[in-house]
Amino acid sequence: MNLAIRYSTKPALYSDMDIKTDKDKITKIKKFLAFVLRHKPFFYKIKLDMDGFAGSEDLAKAVSNNLKMDVKKEDLIEIVKKYSGGIFVASKDSSKIAARDGHTFIFNMNVPDGFVKTNNVPKTLYGLITKKDFSNIFSSDIVPLSNKKVFLATVSPKEDDKNVILTINTQKTLKKTGEFYYNEDEGLYYAKFVTTDSIIIHV
């Protein structure tokens, strides 16, 4: 299904004639972009850079596949620049798009020094998290470990008065495009986030 009638002399998404009939499609696209860029980019295999920008081409493919619309990068850029009301912003070269605010997850995109991405991850890793943070982690389906400065080990640490042990089934996070990093010198692992369904509860 085409998003709108295209003209050979004007490849942009909308013409002055069809803008009113496409308002519903614009709204659907904006809602989808907001959901992906603010809340769950990893569920759609969208990667954000350190400034929260995602590739326009990748976003266009995600919109097309999930909303069943014929959407190109140029279409999204026009929505961002003309019809988003400042909700989104495009890079100068139009290669990337970001949501200005409203993020429910904010984690440090930078990987700590000495940590290298690895696919060789033990099935179970352990870390310490404050009791306050632990009590709140199930309010969302992801846990931004980088915000809480949690590092993971293969051996369970000792629980203390301020912290509880966080036990992670790494395979569940990896299935949802999570990434793990390893510091060989320290023997520690690091993740920007884990999914709440990967957390093992001990009763």
Image (spheres, rainbow, N blue to C red):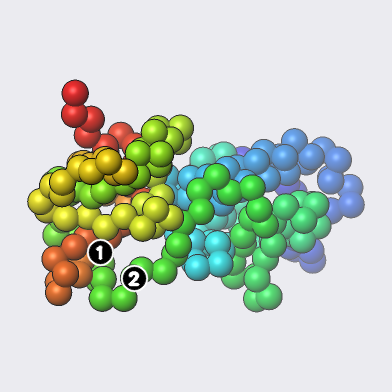
Where's residue 41, x and y in %?
Answer: 48, 50
Q: Point out the image quarter for the N terminus.
A: top right
Question: Of callouts 2 and 1, which one flags the residue occurring earlier in the amino acid sequence?
Answer: 2
Q: Which tag is nearer the camera, tag 2 or tag 1?
A: 2
Observer-nearest residue: 198 or 14?
198
Where's residue 155, x and y in %?
Answer: 10, 51
Circle on res. 181:
1
| Residue identifier under label 2 | 112
Which quarter of the picture shows residue 130? Answer: top left
Q: CA distance from mark 2 to mark 1?
A: 9 Å
**Rendered residue at 79%/39% (across/down):** 23
Which quarter of the picture shows residue 124? Answer: top left
In screen coordinates, is 85 left or right of 141? right
Q: Secondary structure at mark 1?
A: strand
In screen coordinates, is 73 left or right of 116? right
Where's residue 45, x and y in %?
Answer: 41, 52
Circle on res. 55:
none
Q: Residues within 10 Å of mark 1 (few under 14, many from 20)?
A: many
Q: Is residue 156 above or below residue 184?
A: above
Q: Are marks 2 and 1 in contact (CB under 8 Å)?
A: yes
Q: Is residue 123 above or below residue 200?
A: below
Q: Secondary structure at mark 2?
A: loop
